[in-house]
Amino acid sequence: MTPLQEQLRERDRRVTELGRYEEKLELKEGDPIRFELLYSKIVQSVTSAHEVARLVSASPMSRELGEIIFGLYTPEGDAVALSRGLLIHVHTMSRMIKWMIEQGYEDDPGFAEGDYYFNNDPYIGGAHCPDQMIVTPIWWEGDLVGWAGGLTHTPETGGSEPGGFIPFARSRFDEGLFLPCVKVAENDRVKRDLEVLVERGIRSPIFWLTDNRAKITGAQIIRTEVKGLIQQFGVDFFGKACREYIEDTRLAAQQRIRKVLHPGVYREVGWRGSVMPGSETLLHGPVAMTVTREGRLVFDYEGLSPAGKHPFQGTLPTIEGLVMNVAIQHLFYDLKHNEGVLLAVDLKVPEGSAGNPPSIFYPTALWGITYGVGLASGQAISRAYYANGYREEVHATSALSSAYTAGGLDQYGRPFGAHNFEFAAAGLFGTAVMDGLDTAGVEFNPEGEMGDAEIWEQILPPMYLAREIHTDGGGYGKYRGGNGVQSLYLVWGTKDIEIGGFGAAPIYSAPGLMGGYPAGALYMWVGSRTNIRQLIAEGQPIPSGEGEDPASPDFVRMVEGRWELIPGHNRIGRPAREGDLFTAMTGDGGGFGDPIERDPALVRRDLENLVTTPWTARHVYCVAIDPESLEVNQEETERLRQARREERKRTAVPAQEYKARQREVLLQNDLAKPTARMYHGVLGSSEAFRRAFAEFWELPDGWQMNDPDGESEEVA
């Protein structure tokens, strides 16, 4: 056993047996000012690495959108401090370091000063092939005292389709070039042979290669700063302080849980879809979150859909990252962000499920259902807040977004492949006290933004005809969900290009909470063989957006061509011609509360800002507004709302009656095919869920869930 393996075993024993990372906080209690001073300098070093590396990279993912994060780690691979940025990856580099230690990398190929290891294998650490991380050891007088690392998201991986997001991947081998924990630099010099591999293996190597240099630059900054801190504070103080920072965070996290979350069990569920041709199905992402009186969170994902030959599942590191990302933003936001956060949480992810696949060969390009369980976990936290009397922290969910991908020859005649990542500016969730923000970000990256249109047009040939707030995209509610971005593109400047798209199934992109509506479903319009060039040449009006009626968009009415509506926004790459038009949307946030409780003044404001329509104001929010003056008719508004309440009373179905109806649907095996496939898969893979399902629906012994594809599963 190598020294690092021994340290890792001792670390695991201490945490398991003592329930603590460090037995005593001697430095914090004995010299609190020096203790906090060192931490502030460590945070400064990882933040500097983040900012410098972002500007070194040529990739818009890093430079424009902030899809980047850096961290400092203990010798065993535990995070000590993290920069701002891509918070879904709070633990992925930790997993990479621990994996190398467990695999004996300390002996072969070895950890030397100036070595840099690269990983984009999501089963080791990360969410999918585009998530690429580099770590380097930090040595001091012959001892390995820590690790510095950085992670970026590259827009091209050399997969079977361009852009890294492979919407119809059936195995890992569709997803592109994987380098699992490969040494890419020695003596602080990048290895040329591995760069040649990238240059000849993917469509747009510049993003991958400059991102590597950015990560190496950032890691060098951290390494240099840490050595200066060790010289200033002493190696023993530095090492013990790093361990105490983790324990300090663990204690603070448990104290926060005890203070603000009501003890109990909270159940939520997220859904996503697999739209593989011929086997369309929903994916089931339930969570039972237990808040203990001792201050621990237990997330149990029993009943998660089984893994399958589709790209919408994720890996165990992905779920870890998603849950920690949600917990940090909504619960532990003002604590030190390190391994201590994870030590306050227990995750139970069934083996063989779509969040913990049985082998490394299952694709994970889109990891949609793991994102779904992450959002469900966030809503469970909201309910625990609400039960304890808190309101400001309560929120619905944000969107699982979508985008377009493209590849071929760009407008400069160069081979290219990339995806437009403007979906990092989706609509955010409605909360219990305010509307969700429009086009503001995404759950997985609080720094997310859309990026400049001019930058995207430099790396992707399609030109923007419109980029607008997606009217009424967010879920309706007392506080509405935020509206995302919808863009209209024109293919121009190239005669060799494929356009694809990825998103989810044609169901809502984010659920609402406590009476709030879900966000709208994602979709994509594609117009081929259009007359747009003729319209431009004649100086005729051309579309500048979707308009007020999504069922009859302005671009479809104004531009002649072969128009196709693609629900779910999953589209395999197809050849496009100059003059073709298409849309992409980022996704929207879920709403909170009953829409007819919404303040009419907020509805009027949305009309003034053109983010809702008169139809929605009257028929959803039941607010009467003069179309010319936009004055609210209070008396008519109250009449509309009272009529809606009376309508609800007439048409409402008691819960027991509704349950009886749905039970009859089950007994008759009369579910829609996607739903039947979902439950058939879950019931066949989870005995615990099978028992709970049969008990809840009071199913007779011997009842079986029919598989629409030919088999059946006995439930009781």
Image: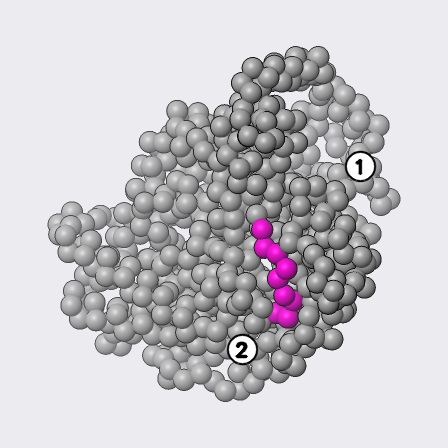
What residue does disc 1 label? 672
**Farthest residue, direction bottom:** 192
Q: Amino acid at mark 1?
A: Ala
Q: Residues within 10 Å of mark 2 (few under 14, many from 20)?
A: some
Q: Amino acid at mark 2?
A: Ile
Q: Image point 51% across, 62% down: which residue? A: 452
Which region shows up in magenta?
460-468
Between disc 1 and disc 2, whose residue precedes?
2
Residue 378 percent location from the top left of the image: 49, 39
Q: Image point 53% across, 74% down: which residue? A: 207
Q: Is residue 159 magenta?
A: no
In the image, 92: left or right of 626? left
Q: Is residue 570 visible?
A: no
In the image, 117: left or right of 648? left
Q: Nearer the viewer, residue 20 or 420?
A: 420
What residue does disc 2 label? 206
Task: Give residue 580's quadrant in the image.
Answer: bottom right
